[in-house]
Image (spheres, helix red, strand yellow):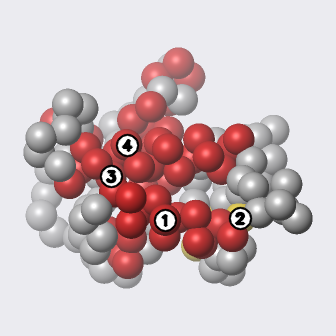
């Protein structure tokens, strides 16, 4: 796959999930709306630990909920760098994700890992599984 420049199924799913969430966040006309439970309750954010589009994750006890679309995707969304949040067009957002995957700035681990932790750069974990 690498010699052909193709992405794995895991990478394509990851990009698709984040692309859908990006569009729901930025496009008021989009049919999928982010439920209020995930919207931030406070306007105070720390630029050192979060970005301007940080979403809230409520406590989850059930795996069936923990691994559903919103919680699974928001965990990855919340650790993306601020540069991703400044993009308003979904196709440009997805292109930036692809470019980071190709340049190994994001590395996805095997799905057998508990969290499937990809890493952006060298120190920022991105939780996608």
As rendered, which of 20 and 115 lies closer to the eye? 20
x and y, in percent, of residue 51 in the image: 32, 70
Distance, label 2 to label 3, CA atoms, is: 20 Å
Distance, label 3 to label 1, CA atoms, is: 12 Å
On-image quarter of the N terminus: bottom right
Q: Which label's residue is closer to the chain start, 2 or 3?
A: 3
Q: Which residue is mark 3?
A: 22
Q: Which label's residue is closer to the chain start, 2 or 4?
A: 4
* Circle 3 crowding by C-alpha within 10 Å: few under 14, some 14–19, many from 20: many
Outermost residue, front side: 4
Q: Which label's residue is closer to the chain start, 1 or 2?
A: 1
Q: Which residue is mark 2?
A: 107
Answer left or right for 45 relative to 85: left
Which circle, 2 or 4, is nearer the viewer?
4
* Circle 1 crowding by C-alpha within 10 Å: few under 14, some 14–19, many from 20: few
* Residue 119 seen by the camera: no
Q: Where 94 falls versus 11 (above or below)?
A: below
Element on which disc 4 rests: helix
Q: Which residue is mark 4?
A: 20
Q: Which residue is mark 1?
A: 95
* Circle 2 crowding by C-alpha within 10 Å: few under 14, some 14–19, many from 20: many
Element on which disc 3 rests: helix
Which circle, 2 or 3, is nearer the viewer?
3
x and y, in percent, of residue 96 in the image: 49, 70
Q: Which label's residue is closer to the chain start, 3 or 1?
A: 3
x and y, in percent, of residue 86 in the image: 28, 74
Distance, label 2 to label 4, CA atoms, is: 21 Å
Write the residue at 67% across / 60% down. 118
């Amino acid at each position: 796959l690498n010699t052909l420049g193709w992405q794995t199924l895991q990478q394509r799913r990851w990009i698709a999930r984040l692309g859908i969430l990006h569009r729901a966040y930025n496009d008021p006309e989009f049919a999928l709306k982010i439920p209020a439970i995930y919207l931030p309750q406070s306007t105070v954010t720390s630029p050192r630990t979060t970005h301007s589009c940080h979403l809230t994750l409520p406590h989850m006890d059930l795996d069936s909920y923990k691994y559903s679309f919103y919680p699974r995707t928001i965990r990855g969304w919340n650790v993306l760098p601020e540069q991703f949040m400044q993009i308003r067009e979904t196709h440009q957002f997805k292109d930036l994700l692809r470019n980071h995957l190709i340049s190994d700035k994001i590395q996805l681990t095997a799905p057998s890992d508990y969290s499937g932790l990809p890493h952006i750069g060298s120190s920022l974990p991105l939780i996608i599984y």
